[in-house]
Each structure stands twice: as structure tokens, then as C-alpha cells.
Amino acid sequence: MTAADVSAGDTAWVLISAALVLMMTPGLAFFYGGMVRAKSVLNMVMMSIVTMGLIGVLWVLVGFSLVFGESIGGVIGNPFDFAGLTAIMSPDAVVGGVPVLIFAGFQAAFAIIAVALVSGAVADRMKFSAWVVFAIVWALLVYFPAAHWVFAFDDSVSAHGGFIANTLGAIDFAGGTAIHINAGAAALALCLVLGPRMGFGKTPMRPHNLPLVMLGAALLWIGWFGFNAGSALGANGTASLAWVNTLAAPAGALLAWLLAERIRDGKPTSLGAASGIVAGLVGITPAAASVSPLGAIVIGILAGVGSALAIGLKTKLGYDDSLDVVGVHLVAGLIGTLAIGFLADPATPTGAAGLFYGGGLGLFGTQAVSAFIVLAYSFLVTGLIAIVLKKTMGLRVSAKAESAGIDVAEHAESGYDFSQVPYSAQNIKSTIVIPAPQKEEASK
């Protein structure tokens, strides 16, 4: 395609969608930040925010090329094809009716949040310097290859793409495998190597700011419309279906999670509502353009109930996934990816038929194989990265720092003012100008 083939409407939609997806990472920072204890909130927020800088630079330098460059055996893109993005600055560099440059920006926001998601599993105890190194290495060795397998289609940006998209033919519209299963498996491996928090299973570790959690969930939901509907790369029918499904699935998951809590615990909670929204969003991500709105509600219900039940496994099995990245992103990602094998509707833009629409079990098998490949690769490679970092620079803050608060130890800051300095006439006068009393008029 050339510059003459660029659609102004489609380009405008992808520009807006890219901004919405980028907003999701600060939304994630609020979501995660409210879920930790008060002494860890700044560190939790910073892990997401620094990822925006790290992966933003890495994506421009080599990330886009590794994901969308000419495929080397269907495994990874050529790192030199688009290094620095200068090769796609030409107005004739077009994909699907939009400039390749904005497509690169859109996908950059995906890469950023995929890495940031992993941080929730290691809240309260991972050294900030170790997180910085981990984020860079994980993006290079795990996310970029997996994204190439899933997102790089033949004859899109390059002539040849990844093997899951083109050889297996699995359906993953916006990243159920490449992002959520990938991040969830990585979170499990990383928290196993890192070990549990001090007092895990014995000391209450309740969220310190539930309104912040709800704010984060709301920003994630809003941003997710760009995440899913933007993946259509155009203002068209596919985007319309993805948008509606991105409304329907988390709505169903929200209600399902609250009902599960009501039955199990006797009370529906705001944390459950926020978590249900995210579970539904994760579940519909791979299926946004391949199921009907009714199918989206079913996926949302399954993701909501499945994740609500799965988060209890960490206590039973003894792994400390601090903010339930495994229970929500891995579990809901698997549910959404596998559900396509049953609920894919041939009337949708993908045209695929699941088991319930007469398509047999072939599609389910393809979905299961692709999910297992990404899960296994991410878990094994992340585990190796974590072990190497643990043996070299160390992963964990000291016990003293963890007990006192990771914010002060790692950033010399606190999210809240915990000082007990009493007010006195001296410090009041130093900060407040008190006007002199006015003299009463003689007539009074």
C-alpha cells in the first residue's frame, strides 16, 4: 500500500486507540497501587511507570523490529529491519489503511502494559533495580518473541510472520496468549523464585486504598475499548463488535464475581467488583471479534467465576502472587482463549466456527496448543531469568526494608505523610501568615 491508500478515519481511530491503551498502564498503576499496603504504594506505582520509559525506548530501538520484522523461522523478527523506526517513516509505509508508524505506536502500548502486568506478583519485596533489569530482559527474551508468534501475520508489515498466527492459525484478536497468558505464567515463575512476603498467610495484607483500586479498574475498562476495538485497525464493523463485546464480557464478569463472593463469603466487595471487571476484560481480549455479544457475556461469566475461585489457590499451594496476576490474567486468559473453540460464531468477522456452531473440536485443539506453547515458554524462560538475576544482583530487598516499607527503602519517599510532628505556635507561624487583629472603631 501507499500513502494514497491511507484512510483518515481509520488512522484517527488507531491514534485514539493507541492513546487509550497507553492510558491503561497508569490505570494499572492505580489498580495495583491501591491493592498493596500503604508503605508500598509508591514502589508499586513506580514499577508500572518506569516500565513506560524502559519499554518505550526499547520498542523504538529494536522491539518493533523483533516483533514485526521479517520472520526468522517463524520465531523472531529480524532486529535490523526496523531498528530505530526510521524505515517506516515514509508516507508509503502503510498497513491496513493506516501508517505503519502509528501501528508501531499502538503496539508499543501493548508491549508496555504486558511487562507492567507482571509486577503485581512481586509487590512489597522486589528490588526496584532488579525490576528494571528484569523488565528489559523479559521484554527481549519473552514478550517480543511471543508477540511475534501471535501478532505478526504474513504480508502485513513484513512478508513472513510468526508461526502461531500463520502456521497454527490460532485466533487471538488482541493478546489473550501473547499478553495475558504470557504475563500470568511469568508472574508465577517470578514469584516462585522470589519467595513469599514476610508474614504471608499469617499477617493480614489488605488493600490500603479501595477507591484507588476502583479508579484503576475504571481507567482499565475505558482504555480496553482502544485495546480491543483498536485492534481492528479501522473504524469498521470488526471494531464495532469488539467494542460491544468489551462492554458485555466485563459486565458479566463483574456480576458473576460478586455473586460468587456473595455465595462463598456472604458479602459482595468493591475489590471483587474491580477484579471481576479486569477478569472479564482479560477473558474477552482474544475472542473480541470471534464471538457474539451473548458469547461475550458467557465468557465474562466464566472468567469472573473462574478467577474468583482461582485466587484462593495461592494460599493452598503456598505461592505468593501478591496481587493475583496468576489468578486473574493467566486463568481468565486461558478461559477466553479456550472458549473460542466452543463459542466462535461463523457470523463474526473471523468466520470461524466453534464446537457449539458445528465446527468440531479442531479449533479448540488449535487454541489449546497455542496457549500451552506460550504458557510453557514464558514460565521456563522467566524462571531462568529470575534465577540468574537472583544469583547475580539479587532480587529481593532486605528483611528490614521489607518490614519498614519498601517505599522509603527504595525511593526515599512515602506515599502518605506518616510524620507525627505536632503543631506549635512556631511551626504554624512559619507556614501561615496570620493577619493582625483590626482595631475597633472609636464609635464602637
Image (spheres, rainbow, N blue to C red):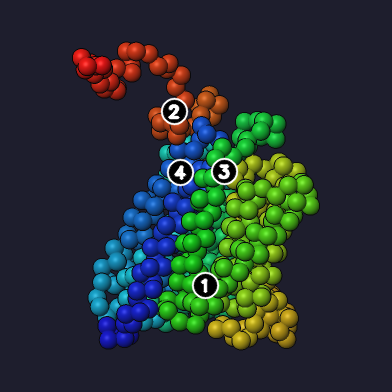
The reply to whether residue 94 is in sight is no
Residue under label 4: 45
Residue under label 2: 417
Residue under label 3: 210
Instruction: Tell us which disc is closer to us: 4 or 2.
Output: 2
Label 3's element? helix
Q: Earlier in the sequence, mark 2 or mark 3?
A: 3
The amino acid on which the numbered mark 2 sits, given as a three-letter code, is Asp
The amino acid on which the numbered mark 1 sits, given as a three-letter code, is Trp
- The circle drawn on residue 331 is none
Residue under label 1: 243
- Characterize the local packing of mark 2: few (<14), some (14-19) or many (20 or more) Cα atoms within 10 angstroms: few
Q: Position of residue 11 (x, y in %)?
A: 35, 76
Task: Give me the residue at 67% from left, 30% from top.
Answer: 203
Instruction: Tell us which disc is closer to us: 3 or 4.
Output: 3
Q: Earlier in the sequence, mark 4 or mark 2?
A: 4
Label 1's element? helix
**Between marks 4 and 1, how big is the CA–CA gap?**
28 Å
**Between marks 3 and 4, how big is the CA–CA gap?**
15 Å
Q: Earlier in the sequence, mark 1 or mark 2?
A: 1
